[in-house]
């Protein structure tokens, strides 16, 4: 009888320890906040309750080298029903400039976030910073985080790149409440055949390091596609939201292989001029890629994430997947 009671206790204990599946969230990376009907369907079907909305970038003015907010978000639709996390992308060169007063920058950043919130009746309890800091900028970025904490009185999260995971003892660990691993943009954007968004061979070099990272990690996964414009073997631009199906139908281009297309005539396409022999190299993420990434992460994370954040919510991105792919990934953990 005692053994039965002990077994029952263990079963109850283990059932209590079972972690819930990660919630599904999205990054919203447009300058105008307004949902299409298909985007509304994606949000509803996946019971999305939180959106990470890019509020603005922080860049440097070329003439004065002063930090300034760039391309702030404009809300044309209410955020009712969603928890909003403002995301501010800060270019690394801002922190490389020793003349920037970090306390002043933190105060101004917080003030601008508050202005946007007040204008659009948005209440927040978290702000996320996206910056690919380096060894030479880490101290100033971390100092900025500390200064922002003092003036904002909200939780702070930060995006973490794979190289910052593997070499965290050198690159440092930010003093934040939450860290989000960007599991994409792994390789160099190049005219070769590799996929710079995701390459398993590159990812495998970092996976074991994830176990050693001192912060709990939430996961950001890619669902975007872009095309690299190549001329004479050199990259001339990066084209987002360009359809590979439209290029296949365009008589000005000929398909070289699965991802490369060559211009056979000079032409304008989407506001871009293509010379004869120019190349478009398409990079995208398949459902199989996403599931493979999920399996690898599950095996190497110290604990399951509480949240999976997909980058980014746009009907151009989501239309390439089955409607249940996001739930499949969440259920894989």
Image: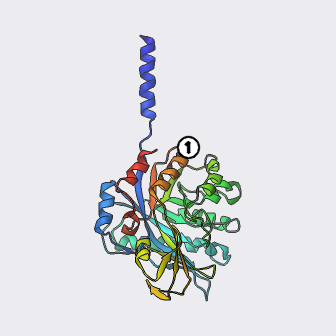
In the image, is 222 to the left or to the right of 320? right
Q: Residue at x 67, y 66 (%)?
A: 134
Q: Residue at x 42, y 15 (%)?
A: 4
Q: Residue at x 43, y 81 (%)?
A: 251
The scheme the figure's colours follow is rainbow
- In the rendered image, the vertical position of residue 92 relative to residue 309, given as above or below: below
Give the SS element for disc 1: helix
The residue pinned by badge 1 equals 299
Foreground of the two, 280 or 175: 280
Q: Quadrant of residue 159?
A: bottom right
Q: Position of residue 303 (x, y in %)?
A: 53, 43
Q: Residue furthest top?
A: 1
Q: Position of residue 279 (x, y in %)?
A: 55, 78
Q: Position of residue 54 (x, y in %)?
A: 45, 69
In the image, is 212 to the left or to the right of 25? right
Q: Position of residue 129 (x, y in %)?
A: 53, 65
Residue 263 appears in the picture as rendered = yes
Foreground of the two, 251 or 32: 251
Q: Quadrant of residue 20?
A: top left
Foreground of the two, 175 or 82: 82
Quarter in which the N terminus is drawn:
top left
């Amino acid at each position: 009888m005692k053994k039965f009671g002990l077994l029952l206790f263990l079963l109850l204990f283990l059932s209590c320890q079972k972690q819930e599946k990660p919630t599904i969230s999205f990054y919203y990376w447009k300058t105008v906040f307004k949902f299409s009907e298909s985007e509304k369907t994606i949000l509803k079907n996946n019971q999305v309750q939180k959106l990470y909305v890019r509020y603005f970038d922080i860049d440097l003015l070329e003439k004065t080298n002063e930090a300034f907010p760039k391309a702030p978000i404009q809300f044309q639709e209410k955020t009712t029903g969603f928890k909003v996390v403002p995301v501010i992308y800060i270019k690394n060169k801002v922190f490389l400039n020793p003349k920037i007063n970090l306390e002043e920058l933190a105060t101004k950043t917080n003030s601008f976030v508050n202005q946007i919130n007040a204008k659009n009746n948005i209440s927040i309890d978290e702000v996320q910073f996206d910056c690919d800091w380096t060894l030479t900028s880490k101290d100033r970025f971390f100092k900025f985080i500390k200064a922002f904490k003092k003036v904002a009185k909200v939780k702070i999260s930060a995006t973490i790149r794979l190289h910052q995971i593997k070499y965290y003892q050198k690159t440092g660990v930010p003093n934040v409440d939450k860290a989000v691993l960007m599991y994409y943009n792994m390789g160099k954007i190049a005219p070769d055949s590799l996929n710079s968004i995701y390459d398993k061979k590159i990812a495998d070099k970092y996976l074991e390091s994830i176990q050693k990272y001192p912060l709990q990690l939430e996961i950001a996964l890619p669902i975007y596609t872009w095309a690299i414009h190549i001329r004479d073997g050199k990259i001339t631009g990066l084209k987002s939201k360009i359809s590979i199906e439209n290029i296949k139908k365009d008589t000005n281009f000929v398909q070289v292989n699965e991802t490369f297309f060559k211009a056979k005539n000079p032409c304008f396409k989407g506001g871009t001029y293509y010379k004869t022999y120019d190349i478009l190299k398409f990079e995208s993420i398949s459902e199989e890629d996403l599931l493979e990434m999920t399996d690898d992460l599950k095996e190497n994370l110290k604990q399951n994430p509480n949240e999976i954040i997909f980058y980014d919510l746009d009907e151009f991105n989501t239309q390439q997947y089955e409607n249940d792919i996001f739930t499949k990934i969440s259920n894989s953990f």
